[in-house]
Image (cartoon, rainbow, N blue to C red):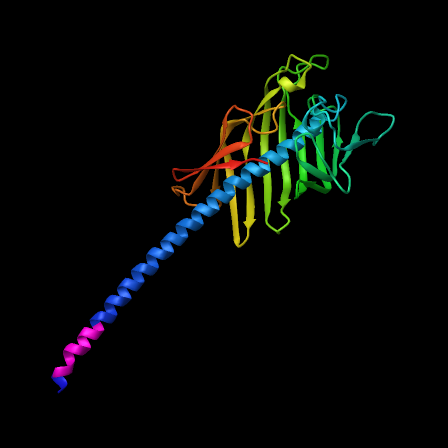
Amino acid sequence: MKIRFIPAVLLSSMLLFSMLIISSCQKENSQNGTDEEQEIAASRASGESESEAEIVFNGIFDDAMGVNDEVGVGGTGVFGRLNVCPIVTVIRLNPPDLFPVKIVMDFGANGCVGQDGHFRKGKVIVIYTNRLIVPGAIATTTFDGFYFDSTKVEGTHKITNISTPVSTNTPPVDRKFRVDVIGGKLTKPNGNFIEWNSEKVITQMEGLNTPIPLDDIFKIEGGSRGVVKRGPLLVGWQSTILEPLVKRFNCRWIVRGVVRTVRINATANTPWVALLNFGNGTCDNLAVVTINGVSYQITLP
């Protein structure tokens, strides 16, 4: 009787063992798939967030430059369009000296829509130590309840003219700016956010010899780091500009250049790197994020 039950026990044990192996393999494969999806989602979120932060704060550079030709070059950013949205207040901080000067761009508590189609509300506040085209000049921008569309913008944006002066009476042979974003934050209505710190150098390549700012072309070099929250996903990343970004005052978007973003503390050979490509020079609101050989087209703000 005892011997007769051994095959049944063995058979049951073998079946159970096989089921456990199959279940274990299925679980491992499922986890690998989930991990891969999470890595793709994280890489894509970091690449897209890098592009959004770059475009929003690049617009702040244009606005600070464009208020007028007393503090910048005039006519760029929101000031380069027919329907100028904000009410501008000029406050001399050491009268009768022209500088330092505080410029308040007030888009109103109810906001307004500019010619670029974007809704803005709140205040953008810029303090200038000198006209921005003068070597050594600094413009520091902060925000008071400022929204770009439905995104709340916070942080400090600082432009420093690091051009090399030839003499006191001669304009510099180049025009170069260091642009720092300190504690930048873009917050969505649903609580998702992008935190961004950036250190860039912007060098003018064309338009130095003309008084018209809309023919000015710049290259942007440097890097940044950030954190993005999208629902349950929270990702920290760092970025490096591989091919200089190209910006023109006559276009709202970056028109060329490649940025590499990777998760903080990722291994050196990780395949989960996002390459953000802003295009071939055409002025449009499209860019491409490529992750592990797979490309996704995104729309810039």
In which quarter of the view is residue 204 placed? top right
Q: Which residues are magenta?
A: 4-13
Picture mark count: 0
208 or 147: which is nearer to us? 147
72 or 264: which is nearer to us? 72
| Image position, residue 138 (x, y; %) | 71, 29
| Image position, residue 183 (x, y; %) | 64, 43
| Image position, residue 75 (x, y; %) | 71, 23
Would residue 212 be seen by someone viewing this image from the given angle?
yes
Q: Is residue 95 left or right of residue 105?
A: right
Say which residue appears at 39% left-offset and 42% top-offset.
271
In the image, residue 263 above or below residue 98: below
- The extreme right residue here reads 96
Quarter of the image where the N terminus is located: bottom left
215 or 114: which is nearer to us? 114
Dominant secondary structure of the residues highlighted in magenta in the image: helix
Does residue 11 show up magenta in the picture? yes
Would residue 103 be seen by someone viewing this image from the given angle?
no
| Image position, residue 229 (x, y; %) | 56, 49
Say which residue appears at 79% left-offset and 33% top-offset.
87
Quarter of the image where the C terminus is located: top right
Does residue 301 show up magenta in the picture? no
In which quarter of the view is residue 290 placed? top left
166 or 278: which is nearer to us? 278
Q: Is residue 244 left or right of residue 134?
A: left
In the image, residue 262 above or below residue 117: below
Say which residue appears at 63% left-offset and 41% top-offset.
184
